[in-house]
Each structure stands twice: as C-alpha cells, then as structure tokens.
C-alpha cells in the first residue's frame, strides 16, 4: 500500500481515492454504510426527506430507494418508478423494490387501502356539508323533489340525484342526525 492508498471504512478494501475526503471505495460501500438492516427492511439511516423517503448524495441528492435499485438490481427505464412492496418509504432493501408505472403505484395504494381521499365537506370543491346532505336525504324521503332540493341547497340537479341514488355522500346516513 503506498501513501495515497486508503482503506474503505465499510468493506476494508484498499483503494485509490479520487478526492481527499473520500472514505469509501465505491458508491455501493458509501450507500450500504448508511443502511440499518432489520429482519425485513433495510432502513435508510442518513438523510430523510419530508415525505419519509431517504435521500442519498452530497452534491446532488437522489432518492435512496432509486439508488438502491440501480446499485443492486439494474437501470431504471424512462417513465418507470421504483415501487415498495413493504410500503415503507425509508426502506432500500432491493428485494422489496420493483419497477412500475405511476398507475401501478396508485392501483397498489388502492388495493392495500392506503389511499386517503378527501370525502364530503373535506373535499375542497364541496358546496354541501354532512348536515345539509342528511337534510337532503330526509326531505327526499318525505317526497320533496330533486329540482326543489337543488334550488333549496344551491347545487345542480345531478348532485341531488347522485345523493339520492347513493353514488355520492355514501358516508352520510340520515340516522346519524342527532335531534
């Protein structure tokens, strides 16, 4: 070993550094040094973004799970994203990662019950509240017509029809109303 050679902090291999501060022999060693392996997941223990995903890199940041996929599995084709089978954004275990489209990711999210939809009055475009929908359902059951309900509550006729048919506002039940 000559004076310019260094020993990798992770694997112990001797290497020729390309810069004074380089302490790992490869990107793979630098990456793995920042991972805590559990029975199932490999948890990224370095930088974490606000959304819970790991961040790797010093001059330019990359998503850690994407780096893991490229290091241990192979290249990521344009238009594809890296999906987690474990649903843990901090996981970088290559056996938990696969390629797919954004559509695949959304379908996976729905299938696993992780989709958080804004429903009812929590939906920003809603003109109605849960109380007003309960009143629409109550009045409708007493014979008040769709057009009259539409005028009373300031919404389009089709909005009332969807409430009456059970297509929308399915989380609201007339029996929920407290007298």
Image: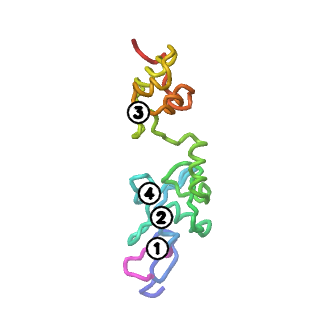
- The disc, 3 or 2, on the residue closer to the chain's N-terminal end is 2
**Residue 56 lies in the magenta stretch:** no
**Left or right of residue 76, residue 2 in this image:** left
Residue 43 % position (x, y): 49, 54
* Residue 121 tag number: 3
* Residue 33 tag number: 2
Q: Label 1 to label 2, Cα distance in Å?
A: 9 Å
- The disc, 2 or 4, on the residue closer to the chain's N-terminal end is 2
**Residue 25 lies in the magenta stretch:** yes
Residue 113 % position (x, y): 56, 39
Of circles 2 and 4, the one toward us is 4
Q: Given the current orientation, which residue lies at the most extreme top position?
A: 179
On screen, 44 above or below 178? below
- The disc, 1 or 4, on the residue closer to the chain's N-terminal end is 1
The kind of secondary structure element at disc 2 is: loop
Judge the density around disc 2: few (<14), some (14-19), many (≥20) Cα neighbours within 10 Å.
Answer: some
Q: Given the current orientation, which residue lies at the most extreme bottom position?
A: 2
Residue drawn at (47%, 64%), measured in percent from left and top? 33
Residue drawn at (45%, 83%), measured in percent from left and top? 5
Residue drawn at (47%, 26%), measured in percent from left and top? 147
Q: Where, by quadrant of the figure, is residue 101 drawn?
A: bottom right
Q: Are marks 1 and 2 in contact (CB under 8 Å)?
A: yes
The kind of secondary structure element at disc 3 is: helix
Judge the density around disc 3: few (<14), some (14-19), many (≥20) Cα neighbours within 10 Å.
Answer: some
The kind of secondary structure element at disc 4 is: loop
């Amino acid at each position: 070993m000559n004076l310019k050679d260094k020993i990798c902090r992770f694997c112990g291999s001797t290497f020729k550094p390309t810069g004074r501060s380089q302490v790992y022999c490869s990107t793979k060693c630098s990456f793995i040094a920042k991972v805590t392996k559990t029975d199932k997941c490999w948890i990224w223990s370095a930088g974490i973004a606000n959304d819970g995903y790991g961040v790797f890199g010093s001059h330019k940041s990359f998503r850690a799970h994407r780096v893991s996929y490229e290091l241990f599995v192979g290249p990521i084709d344009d238009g594809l994203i890296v999906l987690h089978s474990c649903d843990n954004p901090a996981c970088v275990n290559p056996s938990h990662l696969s390629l797919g489209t954004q559509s695949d990711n959304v379908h996976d999210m729905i299938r696993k019950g992780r989709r958080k939809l804004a429903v009812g009055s929590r939906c920003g475009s809603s003109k109605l509240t849960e109380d007003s929908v309960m009143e629409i359902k109550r009045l409708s059951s007493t014979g008040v017509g769709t057009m009259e309900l539409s005028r009373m509550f300031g919404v389009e006729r089709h909005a009332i029809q969807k409430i009456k048919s059970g297509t929308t506002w399915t989380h609201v039940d007339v029996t929920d109303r407290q007298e």
